Image (cartoon, rainbow, N blue to C red):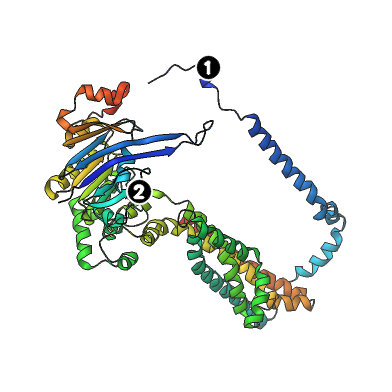
Amino acid sequence: MVHPSSPEALQPPRASLPEKLVSWGLWLGFGLLLALSFKGAQMGDLPLLIQKWQNTRAYLNDYLHPDFSDANTVAYYIQQMWITIQVAIWGTLMSVGLAIPFALLCSNNVVPAWIRFPTRRLMDLLRAVNEVVLGTAFLVAVGLGPLAGVLALAVHNTGVLAKLFSEAVEAVDQPPIEGVRATGGTRLQEIVWGVIPQVAPLWTSFALYRFESSVRSATVLGLIGAGGIGYALFQNIDSFNYARVSAIALIIVAAVVLIDLTSAALRKRLV
Amino acid sequence: MPSLVDVQSLSKSFALKAQGEAPTRRFKALDNISFTMDRPQRIGLIGPSGSGKSTLLRSLSGLIVGDEGSGPLTVLGRTVQADGRLGAEVRAARADLGMVAQQFNLVGRLSLFTNAALGLLGRIPPLRGLFGLWTAEEKQRVMQALDTVGIADKASQRANTLSGGQQQRGAIARAIVQDARLLLADEPVASLDPVTARKVMELLVHLNEDRGVGVIVTLHQVDYAMKYCDRILALKDGKIVYDGPADGLSADHLSEIYGPEIEQAYWRDPS
């Protein structure tokens, strides 16, 4: 079926003047923002990085000889690294458990705006507070040790995962959910049978991704006394024992790379 | 004995928000529709694209709610909706309604068995349905339904690994498990090859003749509607323009319904 069309009808769509102005305005605003933050971020001093390269070299030189001489110490570091990983495991697991209900309460295809809005703001708050700040607060509550780290990771990651999980929920296909609804299922049954099977692989992938970054965060949490390899790292930095610091850094890098590779392989299979 | 379906003065309009048009303009998808089905029939809903077939079908299960002022829409005496609101008994009404859609509405990552078992949701206690705790007898019923549609051997396969025709039969099996008294099928053969399409249509005839299930099916292909249905409801611009026996539908009726696009309404069955 062919309708003869006039040349006007065959004109490709073109942006109108107001649309163009908005687009230019956005680019101009972005440029201004970059210019304004140039001074605040001390970007003018960037050449120092090259001018003072010898200082950097002298510092890094100490790191070139990692000290793995004492087997007992190395075993201790590996054991501490394992503690850090355990902190990340429990921190992530707790956050997944908390993020699932919160994610559903953040999703526009599940709950009305009056529930969604306050829940989203609460999640923003959890996300906004850094793990180290949360860790210091939990150190006061439960004392020095890995538990404070677990709790800090759990709270911060709940905010992050709830957002990621809810974005997945908002992108689900509607027909399978309607299929469940059409059988006379309840609202909760629609979620359990229609929504969750659709988002499960993506949720698992997000959780694994957060686990990877939790291992890195848990290392930093050790610096403030929440146990694990970070604490050992901090002690050696304090005593200027850079050869040990270098050994610990290598153990961390090896563990993180191993976990990232395993997790990435798992995520690839899931999605 | 209440009517299987009773629709009184159902209207539905949608807001149009196309570019360059005022968002207040409304498009009337259904315009004062009334009809009843007193005994289990096979009603073929026909009409050109955009005539309101799917809107009418989805309104019957309360997936679309009509405009304010629409009369009551009841299924087996239970009010699905009235005056632009879902009725209090809509879930009970849905339990009696089987829904089969063009895109099958199965949950892709669940097994065919679980998908068919979801037909039980409206019939069993909500908590049991939530956790999928089917009894041995119910499991047997699901397998029998899958056997009726000829795909019992695929029970453990994920729905998204099945062919279009198998998925469509899965959706019909779900309606059988549901023990639906009325089956609503929205373009059930639109994405199937002619041979599979014929099998699916024959299954609908079997459910109607041997099990006393009322069937309302939207079809793009007039010849299918005339071959497999005993009553035709033709829609044009949201209004019923023909309601009568399939064999009473004349070429004049068809050219009035479809206008110059009549040729596209035929899908020559190779049989």
Residue B9 appears anywhere in the view: yes
Residue B13 x/y as whole percent:
39, 38
Q: Amino acid at mark 2?
A: Leu
Residue at the extreme left:
B210
The residue where tag 2 is placed is B63
Tag 1 residue = A7
Q: Quadrant of residue A138?
A: bottom right
Specify the subunit that label 1 lies on.
A
Quadrant of the rendered image containing residue A123: bottom right
* Number of marks in picture: 2
Q: Is residue B217 left or right of residue A50?
A: left
Is A22 displayed left or right of B147 in the figure? right
Frontmost residue, A220 versus B226: B226
Q: Position of residue A175 (x, y in %)?
A: 37, 48
In-image side of B201 versus A55 (left or right): left
Please, what is the three-letter code of the amino acid marked with disc 1?
Pro
The image position of residue A254, as x and y in percent, is 62, 67
Alpha carbons under labels 1 and 2: distance apart: 43 Å
Q: Could you tell me which residue is drawn at 22 percent across and 64 percent down?
A: B138
Q: Residues within 10 Å of mark 2 (few under 14, many from 20)?
A: some
